[in-house]
Amino acid sequence: MSGFEDVNYYFRKAARIMDLSAHVEQMLVTPFREVKVDVSITLDNGELGTFIGYRVQHDNSRGPMKGGLRYHPTVDMDEAQGLASLMTWKTAVVNLPYGGAKGGIAVDPAALTPREQERLTRRFVQQIHDIIGPHRDIPAPDVNTNAQVMAWIMDEYSRIHGFSPAVVTGKPVELFGSRGREEATGRGVVMALEEHLKDAGLGEVRGKTFAVQGFGNVGSWACRFLHDRGGRIVAIGDAGGGVRNPEGLDIGALLAHARTTRTVSGFAGGEPISNEALLRLDVDVLVPAALGGVITEANAADVRARIVLEAANAPTTPRADEILQERGVTVLPDIWVNAGGVTVSYFEWVQNIQQFTWDEDRITAELGRHMREAYATLARVVRERQVSFRTAAFIVAIGRVGRATALRGV
Ligand code: NAD
């Protein structure tokens, strides 16, 4: 299945339970707008570099559209459609006044110099500036884009439209970014788990064992928060390999190691482990926090964790999701678990519009409120409808987007 088909599979499963008509279903899955643009730049050596940029705006019934920009060779329309629709459902689950969007450029940014990356970013903004904006579509960082890229976007957009810090989120804190944004997704992931453990009578993070795939922004912050709460992280993998220590990895020392080597691999405080073996470890909680599509039909039967905490976007394929459910593994779904990032992006946008800054305590408290309220709603739907957390999340999201669409009138 393609990325978009995967998301729509989950959508349709929930839509069937909700008895949505085929027409409404089709309208809700169809993207509002899809744009594909030429992003040609002069490279430092004087030659022409031609790249393709994408932006998919999925739905705007609940507010301006929101979603990341990814710079990666695999970026294409299908991936952008799938991730844009996921953003529609995610913002609805945590009840933010946004719709969903996603996009990026098919490029390997590591092959470009910083000056070329800047030219590429500015050219992309010139190509899409009339369809983005603080009240239209607000990009944010995603794979291989960061606060610096967001600063260039803000500057280029402001050059054309006048001072507009609210056109992107994930900006540097010194340039209208928000405190707490960098760690927001990892913090939200751990808040999500704590809510579930409490509600399910499973105790707390302290003493539980974890295997984490991905030690980038989301994975490393999640590990820090889990470690601070007494969780025992027994394995971590990334693109360079993996490391395992049944006694629990020393996260502080591992962060220092990864800062210099850019991978967890080779860490002296543990034994090597492959990413595939990591997914099969006997732990309380498995945390995919890297790529999509890693828990598949081929390995779902071997997952021994009791809980899968989806920190990454779309880490579980639909067939794997069914296998996990049949085996009684609780999957806490991405569209709720990793929504902390977009929630604090929302706070950044609010601060930009108000020209007022919030302190970190307020941001953490408001993030906690959004995650808790979302969980309370999901847990109620799980109990009432006897469905999985993922299906409950889609039921809640589709209900909110559907009601907004109907109230506005088609
Ligand atoms: P990142 O680029 O900072 O880190 C990605 C991590 O994945 C790195 O540790 C990398 O080594 C690892 N990785 C890459 N290829 C791998 C492979 N083949 N096997 C194992 N590990 C591999 O990205 P991030 O921002 O931490 O995002 C991680 C995931 O979380 C993505 O799915 C992203 O869409 C999702 N997400 C991120 C945010 C956010 O705020 N950053 C918000 C919501 C969802």
Image: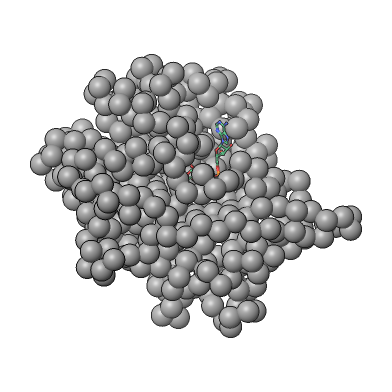
- Please give left or right for residue 266 compared with residue 376 in the image: right
The residue at the point 66 percent across, 53 percent down is: 52
Q: How is the image coloured?
A: one colour
Q: Name the outermost residue toward the top.
A: 302
Hey, which quadrant is residue 341 in on the image?
A: bottom left
Q: Name the outermost residue toward the front.
A: 23
Q: Nearer the viewer, residue 376 or 244?
A: 376
Q: Position of residue 166 (x, y in %)?
A: 49, 73
- Please give left or right for residue 293 compared with residue 404 in the image: right
Q: Name the outermost residue toward the bottom.
A: 162
The residue at the point 60 percent across, 78 percent down is: 158
Whether residue 375 appears in this view of the structure is no
- Please give left or right for residue 124 compared with residue 48 in the image: left
Q: Position of residue 335 (x, y in %)?
A: 35, 46
Q: Is residue 337 above or below residue 410?
A: above
- Please give left or right for residue 51 compared with residue 184 in the image: right
The residue at the point 59 percent across, 66 percent down is: 128
Q: Nearer the viewer, residue 253 or 179?
A: 179
Q: Nearer the viewer, residue 91 or 177?
A: 91
Whether residue 10 appears in this view of the structure is yes
Q: Is residue 14 above or below residue 362?
A: above
Hey, which quadrant is residue 329 in on the image?
A: top left
Q: Quadrant of the C terminus?
A: bottom left
The residue at the point 26 percent across, 53 percent down is: 24
Q: Position of residue 301 (x, y in %)?
A: 36, 17
Total labels: the figure holds: 0
Q: Position of residue 342 (x, y in %)?
A: 41, 57
Hey, which quadrant is residue 391 in on the image?
A: top left
Q: Quadrant of the N terminus?
A: top left
Q: Is residue 244 above or below residue 59?
A: above
Q: Name the outermost residue toward the right.
A: 45
